[in-house]
């Protein structure tokens, strides 16, 4: 694989097997996804720094860009109010498209002080 999928923030420990992001069939599309085995690129660590998130999501985007099931993945995340990077969208992108989470990460519905 290319080094675009690995760095200190996102690489998997060699003794640890990475699980696919979506286990099961999910209407048959998940097993075709480019992201299988790269869950750390699509779901951040708790208290992830903003710069690390940007780097991680750029790498995730590189897998989503040419994925045959990107639209199925995006629709699944939107309809199921998922967290993480799905179908080339993060939580903020889904929120802006009108698919909100009950507790969105980094999205404020009102300004502070109002």
Image (cartoon, rainbow, N blue to C red):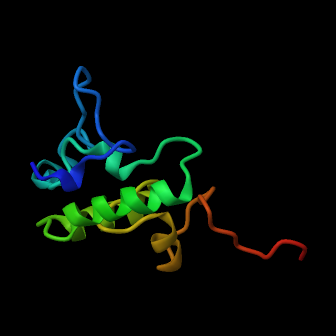
Residue 35, given in percent of the width and then of the height, sits at 21, 52
Q: Residue at x 10, y 54 (%)?
A: 32
Please name whichever residue, 45 or 74, is drawn nearer the observer in this view of the structure. Answer: 45
Is 93 positioned to the left or the right of 12 in the image? right
Is 70 positioned to the left or the right of 46 in the image? left
Res 80 → quadrant: bottom left
Q: Residue at x 59, y 45 (%)?
A: 47
Q: Pick out the residue farthest to the right.
A: 113
Is 22 positioned to the left or the right of 99 in the image? left
Question: In the picture shown, does residue 7 fall above or below 80?
Answer: above
Q: Residue at x 59, y 58 (%)?
A: 105
Res 78 → quadrant: bottom left
- Rendered-image quadrant of the C terminus: bottom right
Residue 43, given in percent of the width and then of the height, sits at 41, 48
Please name whichever residue, 44 or 27, is drawn nearer the observer in this view of the structure. Answer: 44
Residue 28, given in percent of the width and then of the height, sits at 13, 52
Is 46 positioned to the left or the right of 33 in the image? right
Q: Residue at x 44, y 55 (%)?
A: 82
Question: In the picture shown, does residue 76 fall above or below 17?
Answer: below
> What count of labels does the image hold?
0
Res 89 → quadrant: bottom left
Residue 96, given in percent of the width and then of the height, sits at 52, 78
């Amino acid at each position: 694989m290319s080094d675009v999928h690995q760095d200190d923030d996102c690489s998997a420990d060699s003794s640890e097997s990475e699980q696919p992001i979506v286990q099961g069939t999910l209407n048959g599309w998940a097993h075709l996804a480019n992201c299988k085995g790269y869950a750390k690129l699509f779901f951040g660590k708790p208290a992830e720094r903003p710069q690390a998130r940007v780097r991680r999501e750029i790498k995730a985007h590189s897998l989503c860009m040419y994925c045959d099931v990107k639209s199925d993945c995006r629709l699944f995340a939107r309809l199921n109010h998922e967290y993480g990077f799905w179908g080339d969208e993060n939580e903020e992108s889904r929120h802006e498209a009108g698919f909100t989470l009950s507790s969105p990460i980094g999205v404020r519905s009102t300004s502070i002080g109002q």
